[in-house]
């Protein structure tokens, strides 16, 4: 699996307001709010045909996280992986979390080979 190329943000940004988070979630397929207060994050659970597919996905997310210098919490199960984004440095959900969630979606649903981009 190859991760979509995206340059890490040099600025950490700031926490999004409640209405901004809700608006951004509307643009992400299947991502939900998780937790509350100091633990508030965005989360999505991805399901796979086998344990090996789950591990391959988790490793691809880890590689992407290293590229972005932003690391999610992940929970691995037999055929699923939950990915949770939160920006601890701004004590909330940031645009960076939303961007990384979109990148993870692209890992899970890559464009077919030879498809036109844009």
Image: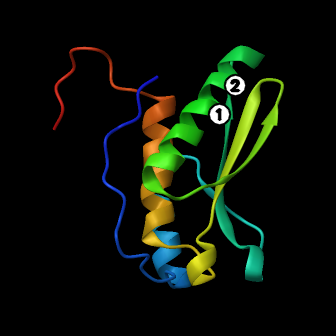
Q: SS at mark 2? A: helix
Q: Residues within 10 Å of mark 1 (few under 14, many from 20)?
A: many
Residue 76, compared with residue 114, is above or below; it is below
Whether the residues at callouts 2 and 1 have beta carbons within 8 Å, the answer is yes
Using the rendered image of the protein, determine whether residue 73 is visible from the camera's viewpoint.
yes
Q: Nearest the camera: 48 or 74? A: 74
Q: Quadrant of the C terminus?
A: top left
In the rendered image, residue 73, in percent from the top left (x then y), is placed at: 71, 54
Which disc, if any, is residue 32?
none
Q: Nearest the camera: 18 or 91? A: 91
In the rendered image, residue 5, in percent from the top left (x then y), is placed at: 31, 41
In the rendered image, residue 115, in percent from the top left (x then y), is placed at: 21, 20
Residue 47, compared with residue 37, is above or below; it is above
Occupied quadrant, residue 89 = bottom right
Tag 1 residue: 58
Tag 2 residue: 55
């Amino acid at each position: 699996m190859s991760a979509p190329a995206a340059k890490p943000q040099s600025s950490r940004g700031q926490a999004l307001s409640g209405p901004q988070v809700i608006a951004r979630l509307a643009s992400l397929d299947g991502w939900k709010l998780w937790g509350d207060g100091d633990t508030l994050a965005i989360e999505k659970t991805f399901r796979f045909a086998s344990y090996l597919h789950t591990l391959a996905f988790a490793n691809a997310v880890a590689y992407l996280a290293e590229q972005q210098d932003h690391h999610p919490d992940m929970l691995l199960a037999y055929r699923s992986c939950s990915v949770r984004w939160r920006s601890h440095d701004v004590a909330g959900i940031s645009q960076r979390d939303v961007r990384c969630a979109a990148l993870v979606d692209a890992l899970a649903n890559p464009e077919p080979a030879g498809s036109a981009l844009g």
